[in-house]
Amino acid sequence: VTGGGAGAATSLTLIGTGGLLIACGVYQLMAQSLTRLVLGFIMTGNGLNVLILAAGGLGPADVLTQAMILTAIVITLGMAAFLLALAYRNWQLNGDDLVQDDVEDHRIARAAHREGVRGELRTQRAAYRADRRAALEASRARKRELREALREARRELRARARLRRAIAARAEDYEYLEEETESDTDFERPPERRGGAE
Amino acid sequence: VTALVPLPVLLPLFAVGVKFLLGPRRAPVQILISLSVLIADTVISTVLMVEADRHGPIVVQVGSFPAPLGISLVVDRFSGLMLGISSAVTLCVLIYAQSQRSADANEDEAGAPLAVFYPTYLVLAAGIADCFLAGDLFNLYVGFEVMLTASYVLMTIGGTDARIRHGAVYIMVGAASSLLFVAAVAVAYAACGTVNLADLAVQLGKVAPAARMAVQVLLITVFSVKAAVFPLSAWLPDSYPTAPAPVTAVFAGLLTKVGIYSLIRTETLLFPEDRQTALLYTVAALSMIIGILGAVAQADLKRLLSFTLVSHVGFLVLGLAIGSVRALSGALFYTITHITVQTSLFLVTGLIERREGTADFGRLAGLARIAPLLGLLFFIPAMNLAGIPPLSGFIAKLALLQAAAADGGVGAYLLLGALLVTSLLTLYAMTKVWARAFWRAPGEGLGKERERQVAVPGGTGFAVIRSQVGEARGIGGRRISTSESYPAGMLGATVALILLSLAYTVWAGSIAEYTQRAAVELLDPNAYIQAVHAVRGGAR
């Protein structure tokens, strides 16, 4: 029975080549463009074929691995052709060949976006409200201050008025006294010189 | 009998060749060929199922090639059962598709998509049959590829914008998992020097545990992608709903089940001793819960059904994870039930689309009054899916529940809880559809018009809202023509599948006995291995 299998020696070069091809291919498979995906698919497929070849081991050619590789190559080729046609059709319809995000992702992203916007609005509204409250508070304080000042001024004015009234009353008293005293002593002077004495 | 074994694969492929020779012109002959091939397929599969049950696994070495080159095809009770069900379902869906096509006035008789549809459909049937028959890991890969490539074509048929966009996701996921499958084959061959499943089963017991683990994890990943088990299921609800109704129906019913079949086959045959039980427990529970939560959130019937599909695949993985005879037997029973029920639900959705032009149940209303027949046709499989007694879904779920309770472990009880929650939520999802689409007064939905006039708030004018969401398209990618009457073939195929699911209830006893025997056979891989070795002459 032919075939490599368990424990058979194999070529390190083959394994290294296969691994490298697969690494490059998988990197390409991460892309969103269908054309790149096709390239990645072909590279990975060929890398895996090389690995199957390595699995057959060294020594006389292993018929089974070759049969398997041939089948895999044909399948990869067919798939690549189909994918290219798909990319072309996508380009025809949409002007790009990007693989779209799936619908649930879209919905989740939209919901997250909406939630984000809503949260932003909420914080903005809260900030606005805080501002309003602070402004109101400040204006109220200012009003209180002004009212206080007004009351103070009024009190002072009232006090001053009282004082003035007191002074005036006193002055009237003096005037009366003066008049009385003047009227006692006035009669000697001529009347036109009386104002000038004040 | 052995001569019959390759026929489920060969007949459809042969028919495809004949079809291409005939060209697209002679439609009646073409239809006759497709129908007769699939009827023959169904008969042969049933014979094989009965024979495999009576005399044990039937093994054929294709072309009588000697050991390493020849390909073994094996029919045991499990694959016989799957073959029988799958061919019956493909036959029904073909009749449905045929009827839908002729009912769609704007489908072009000689149009390219239709000349492609029937051959591709037959290739799909051949691929599915090959997966069930394969006794060899590489042949299983080829079967998968045949099936998947056909499904890629069917998924993007007509080349409309939505189908191309969603199809690209489906195809890339499929292609990536196929690459992993090749890697699994390479690792298995490097470790064991063989890809024949029976030989692998013997050899894998002898190699280092790490190698065994690598093969197992790779295979589980690959089959989980195909079966849409939870962390790898995102592609399914995204891509299935855009395909034409009959295509979605056959995909939903069969393609994921092929993944499940391969998962059960390889896990029981190749790794009987060290199954990744913890992993399977986890993904089964996650699939069930997350899938059904996704379904509850949907507003489109097709998307909702796709999500329930993901969740109910979890039931089948559950059976495998517990792994007792009773659990596997329940899982097999549930597999055939679910194939039939899920397919018929999608076919009914197709009928709803035929009637209303959409499957978006925000727009549908009052179907129970307008179309009581549709109500009945939807109600039976929907209740079956939710697991209402006495329907077969209930019987299968009961078997799984009993198996989980008998297992008695913490994990099994957690799965039991997840199963109950999922069933309840499935019922909720189905009730939601029922309440919206069927029980509202007619006219309460948004209606089926594509253009709606909406008064501009604060103004005097009207705005025209043009909506394309949930608009149903036919096989060729054009909008389907709606009508009040149901084409006989579409209705007949749907009714036939629903009757089949009711038959599971009536003959539940004998089916349960059969799945019991199949489960016993699965858990004792020696019978399989010896049957293969008896034909191809011993392990290396």
Image (cartoon, helix red, strand yellow):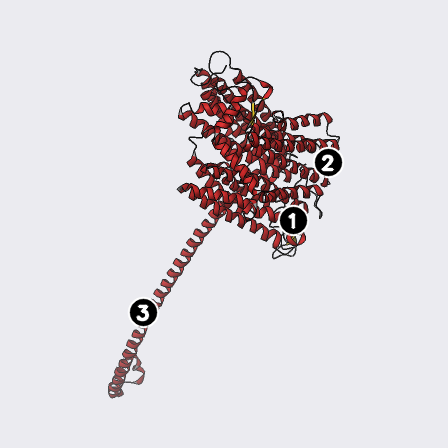
Q: CA distance from mark 3 to mark 2?
A: 98 Å
Q: CA distance from mark 1 to mark 2?
A: 28 Å
Relative depth, front residue between B117 and A173:
B117
Amino acid type at mark 1: Leu
Question: Which chain hosts label 1?
Answer: B
Q: Residue A172 falls in which quadrant of the image?
A: bottom left
Say if mark 3 contacts mark 1, CB within 8 Å: no
- Residue A156 drawn above or below residue A100: below
From the image, tell me which residue sits under label 3: A152
Question: Which chain hosts label 3?
Answer: A
From the image, tell me which residue sits under label 2: B108
Classify 10 Å Cα crowding around label 1: few (below 14), some (14-19), many (20 and above). Answer: many
Instruction: Write the residue at 66% across / 27% down.
Output: B11
Relative depth, front residue between B514 and A132:
B514
Q: Position of residue B178 (x, y in %)?
A: 53, 28
Report whether B187 appears left or right of B3: left
Q: Residue A78 falls in which quadrant of the image?
A: top right
Q: Can residue A178 be spotted in the picture?
A: yes
Relative depth, front residue between B358 and A187:
B358
Mark count: 3
- Residue B351 drawn above or below residue B76: below
Question: Which chain hosts label 2?
Answer: B
Q: Secondary structure at mark 3?
A: helix
Q: Position of residue B125 (x, y in %)?
A: 62, 31
Same chain for the residues under marks 3 and 2 in the image:
no
What is the number of the mark on residue B374?
1
Same chain for the residues under marks 1 and 2 in the image:
yes
Say if mark 3 contacts mark 2, CB within 8 Å: no
Q: Secondary structure at mark 2?
A: loop
On-image quarter of the N terminus of chain B: top right
Q: Position of residue A88 (x, y in %)?
A: 62, 29
